[in-house]
Amino acid sequence: MRDAEPSPRLAALLREREPLLILTGAGVSAESGLRTFRGPDGLWEGKDPAEVATPEAFRDDPVEVWRFYAARRKAAAAAAPNAAHLAIAAMESARPATMVVTQNVDGLHERAGTKQLVRLHGSLWRVRCVVEGREWEDHREDLGSLPPRCECGSLLRPAVVWFGEALPHEAWGKAAAAARRAPLVLVVGTSSLVRPAADLQEIALRAGAYVVEVNPEATPFSGLASERLAGRAGSVLPRLASLVRGRAEATA
Ligand code: BV8
C-alpha cells in the first residue's frame, strides 16, 4: 500500500518552529513486533481487558495479572525501537519544542532517545508497592516467583494505569496543556477508543490545531482529523521527519 503523501499545508507546518505535539498508541510499536491491543492478533484477543488490566483483576488473581505483564516485559525487552520511534526522536532533536505523549508502556520511545516524553499510562519497567505506594524502576529480566514482593513483604504491582484508575495527575496536566497550545498535532497508531487519552486530539482540534492522524486503518477520530495519512508509522513518520529536519538543516 502506497502511504499517503503529506499535504502542502502539512509540509509547511512541519517546517515551522512552533510546538509540535505527537500522541502515540500501540500502533507505533507494531513494527517493533509488539502486539497491539485490538485487531487481528491483539493482546486483548481472547483476554478481556477486565481480566488482566483492572485493580479488581489484580486483587482477585495477582499471579494471572503478573503473568500477562511479565510476558509483555519479555516481549518489550526483546523488541527494538523501529523507524517510527527513531523518526519521532529525530523530529524532537530538529524541533526542540516537541512533546511526545504516549499511551504505551513498552519503553521504546525512551530507548529511541525521545527526551520530552509524557507517559499517560505508566510503564512496564516500573513497579509499585501496594502498601507503601512507593514506585521505582525495575528492569529485572526474571521477576522470580510471581507475584513479586516489596522488601516490606507486600505485593508489588506494575506501575501502569488500569481501567477504572485515574491517570497520573501531572502527566495528564502536561498532556492537556500541550494539546491546548500546539498548532500541529500528530496522532499516531492509536484506535482513539480509550479515554481520557483520546480526548487529547479533540482538545487540540477545539483549540484550533491542525491534527493529523497516521494510521493504516480508519478510527472513530478519522472523520474529525484535519488530515489523515493512511499508512504505517514506520514508513510515514520518517517522511515527516525529513520535512522537519529539512527546515532545520536549511537554517543551520
Ligand atoms: C479512567 C495501560 C476514571 C496498561 C491501558 C465506557 C465504559 C467503560 C469504561 C469507560 C467508558 N468510557 C470511558 C471509560 C473508562 C475507560 C475507557 O476509556 N474504556 C474504553 C475501552 C471505553 N478508561 C479508563 O478506565 C481510564 N481511567 O477513566 O478513570 C477515573 C477518574 C478519576 C478517578 C478514578 C477513576 C484508564 C484507561 C487506561 C487503561 N490502561 N493500558 C497496559 O498497557 O497494559 S489501556 C491500553 O489500551 C493502552 O494503554 C492504550 O491506552 C489503550 C488503547 O490502545 P491503543 O494504543 O490505541 O492501541 P489499539 O490496539 O487499540 O490500537 C492500535 C492502533 O494502531 C489501531 O488503530 C491500528 O490500526 C493502528 N496500527 C496498527 N499497526 C500500525 C498502526 N498504526 C500505525 N502504524 C502501524 N504499523
Image (tube, rainbow, N blue to C red):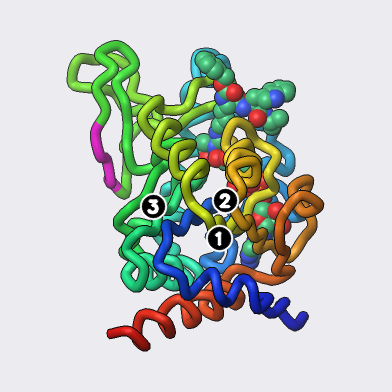
Point 61% across, 48% down: residue: 208
Considering the image in quadrants, where does the C terminus appear? bottom left
Label 3, label 1: how far apart the Cα atoms are = 12 Å
Label 2, label 3: how far apart the Cα atoms are = 12 Å
Going from N to C along the chain, the mark reached first, 3 or 1, is 1
- Graded by Cα atoms within 10 Å as few (under 14), some (14 to 19) or many (20 or more), the crowding at tag 1 reads many
Point 43% across, 53% down: residue: 100
Considering the image in quadrants, where does the N terminus appear? bottom right
Disc 3 under 8 Å from ligand 1? The reply is no
Q: Which of marks 2 and 3 is in front?
A: 2
Viewer-nearest residue: 31 or 211: 211
Range of residues picked out in magenta:
136-140
Residue 52 within the magenta-colored segment of the rendering: no
Q: Residue furthest bottom?
A: 250
SS state under label 3: loop
**Position of residue 74 measured from the top left corner of the image (x, y, whole percent):** 43, 52
Disc 2 under 8 Å from ligand 1? The reply is yes
**Position of residue 90 measured from the top left corner of the image (x, y, whole percent):** 38, 72
Circles 1 and 2 in contact, beta carbons < 8 Å? yes
**Ligand 1: image quarter:** top right
SS state under label 2: loop
Which residue has dot 3 on it? 107
Above or below for 48 versus 10? above
